[in-house]
Structures are given as C-alpha cells and as structure tokens.
Image: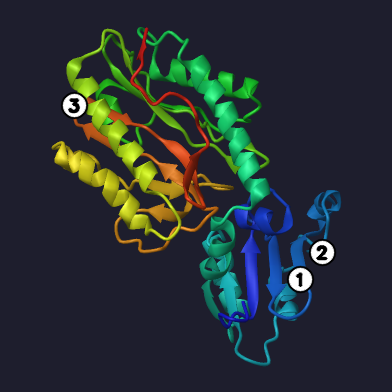
Amino acid sequence: MQQKGIDYLFVSVGSDMFYLTGYSKRPSERLTLFVLPAGGEPSMVTAKFEAARLASIEQFYEVQTWDETEDPMKILQRLVNQTKKTTIAIDDQIWGIFVLRMQEALRGSRFVSAEPVLSPLRMVKDAHEISRLREMGRRMDKVYEETLKLSFAGSTEIDVAEQIQEIGKKQELKPEYPAGVASGPNAASPHHSTSNRVIGKSDGIWMELGSGGHVEGYKADKTRSVQVAPGTQKFREIYEVVKEAQQKAFEAIKPGVTCESVDTVARKIITKAGYGDYFIHRLGHGLGLDIHEPPYIVNGNNMLLQEGMVFSDEPGIYLPGEFGIRIEDIVVVRKDGAERFYESARDLLLVK
C-alpha cells in the first residue's frame, strides 16, 4: 500500500475479506467493512447485532459497531484522516451504493481499485491453499467417476444436474448451485442454462461438475464432455482436436511465459483444424476462493506466469445447432511446468 501511495484499504464482504481476515458472511444492505490503514491499526466496521459473529474467529483488529439508527459512514469519517487528501483503495466486490455513500462522506479522498494490492497476493497460492485445491481435485475425480454411471438417454438435463449435485454432496463438496449440463445443440452455448431438454442417443454433452462446491472456501471448476452411445465420427474427430489443444496448452505452462502465449498455443491448434471461429472464449481463468479470479489466460494479457498461480485450462469448440465440446482442468504453475489437480480421463467416453 505504501509503495502504491494507498493510505487506506477498504474491503467489503466477499472473498477478499475472507482471505484477509477469515470472516465470511452474506452481503447485505448493512455495511460490514474491513479498514486497513497503511500506518496504524485495522478495524472491522459492522452492525452491532452482528458483532457476536466475529467472536468465533481470531481478531487482530478493533471492532467498530453501529446501531440500526446510526450512519456507519460516521465511523469511517472518524477512522480516515481527513486533514489531508487521502487515497482509499476499495475491493472489487463492494456494492455501488456503499461506494457512493463513502464518496459523499469522505469528499476529500480519492478512491481507486484495490486490485493492484490484493490481486498479486491472491494469484500466487501458498502450500495450504494448494493442498485445499488438490483435495478438491481428488473429490471432483470421484464425482466424475460416479457421474459416468448415470443413465443419460431419456433423462432431462435438469435430472442429470440434480443427480450430479447429490453425488457432490456425498463428497462433502457443499454444492451452492446445480451442476451445469448441456446436451445436443444446447451444448453449442458455452454458458448454457441447464434445461428440461430430454437427452437423446448420440447427443454430445458437456458437464460443469463443480456445482460451486468448495473445500475451506477453495472452489472447484471442472468440465468434461461425453457422448451418448452410439458415438459419431464427427464428434470424435472434433473431440480429439479439443483434447490436443488442452494438452499442448498444459505443456506450455511454466514460470516466465505470458498468459496470452498459453491461450495462443491452444487457439492455433483449433484454428489449424478449421474450427478457430468456434473457440469463442478465453482459454482459462484463475481459481481459488472465487471461481473466476486473476490471472486470466487470454489474448492481450502479457502478465508473466509465476510459480503458485492456479487457473483453468479449458479450450472448447461449439458448433451452432449441433454440439459443443469442452475439456477443463485446473492447474498450478510449478517450478518447471504445471500440475493438474484433476486426474480424470480426458479421453472420449461413451455413456448410456
């Protein structure tokens, strides 16, 4: 903060607050804010009736409470030195209404993004974080193994998604929402909303298996594509292109290469096969306490990969009106390459 000329860090409810303080709650219209000055003691501003929630975690800050009839902005006015122009960095997950109230209450302050401070911390995972993500990978492999035993033909996408969610619960993944299931022409949409479409024979299917599950807050994000028997030659041929693109991108990952260069490796393979126009999203995104977080593996991002960075490797080809194929693993950058957290087969499998 001092190096970047930031006087105060304001962090609202969300993954940044959990990362810094261990405190987690649902966001609401009542302000809860962690305030960290570049010099001096930190504070947690919260409604008085919620202060008891903080008693269960280790505190290294003073708890500043406000009553229902009080304005929490007055607490911020006391905490922030307003005798000089100050720079306040706010986290990316704070609600806009709070930002507007802060700007009104602290008119002499300049507000900037906290991303330059928080993102470098969270992008590089430590040994404990990696162990949690590795454990998540172990559980996700079991979810996929059990998912392959389901009956797909004749079931709706929602039926399959709900069954995957139940499988995830048995692995203590604490799913936050149903798995994503896209079949046949629906799978040509990379972010298809699971529907009542009945799955038929020879349908291609991609499945987002994570269901928002987590281990100690660290998320899962895993996609596998299968085909309902009998298989077709076209689906198999395109599947092999996606599989090669995913593998070659994985082999290109190492410290010191740019994020965009890894995306380029996969994109060139898909383009050479004639499907470049149908790979319509970035290769990957960071993953940790959020399912999507930096670094982003996309053209134009010249950030250099560092050991400990974690992100997805998920090329896809989506043919409108026919099918879509995506293979997604989560990887961590190691000293001499990369490690996958998921060991499930990446070969094309036929399901019933």
Disc 2 element: loop
Q: What is the count of numbered marks?
A: 3
At horizontal 55% and vertical 53% (from top left) the residue drawn is 308
Q: CA distance from mark 2 to mark 3?
A: 56 Å
Q: Any mark on residue 42, and which?
A: 1
Q: Which residue is mark 2?
A: 60
Q: Amino acid at mark 1?
A: Pro
Q: Residues within 10 Å of mark 3 (few under 14, many from 20)?
A: few
Question: Which of disc 1 and disc 2 is earlier in sequence?
Answer: 1
Q: Is residue 82 left or right of residue 167?
A: right
Work out whether mark 2 precedes mark 3 in sequence or the reverse, and give the earlier one: 2
- Lower sequence index among marks 3 and 1: 1
Q: Position of residue 223 (x, y in %)?
A: 42, 31
Disc 3 and disc 1: Cα gap in Å? 55 Å
Q: Quadrant of the C terminus?
A: top left
Q: Is residue 30 visible?
A: no
| Residue neighbourhood size for the residue with mark 2, other residues' Cα within 10 Å, grouped as few (<14), some (14–19), many (≥20) | few
Where residue 143 sits, quadrant-wise, is top right
Residues marked 2 and 1 touching at CB (< 8 Å) = yes
Report whether 281 appears left or right of 155: left
Q: Is residue 284 above or below residue 38?
A: above
Q: Which residue is mark 3?
A: 321
> Please, what is the three-letter code of the amino acid marked with disc 3?
Gly
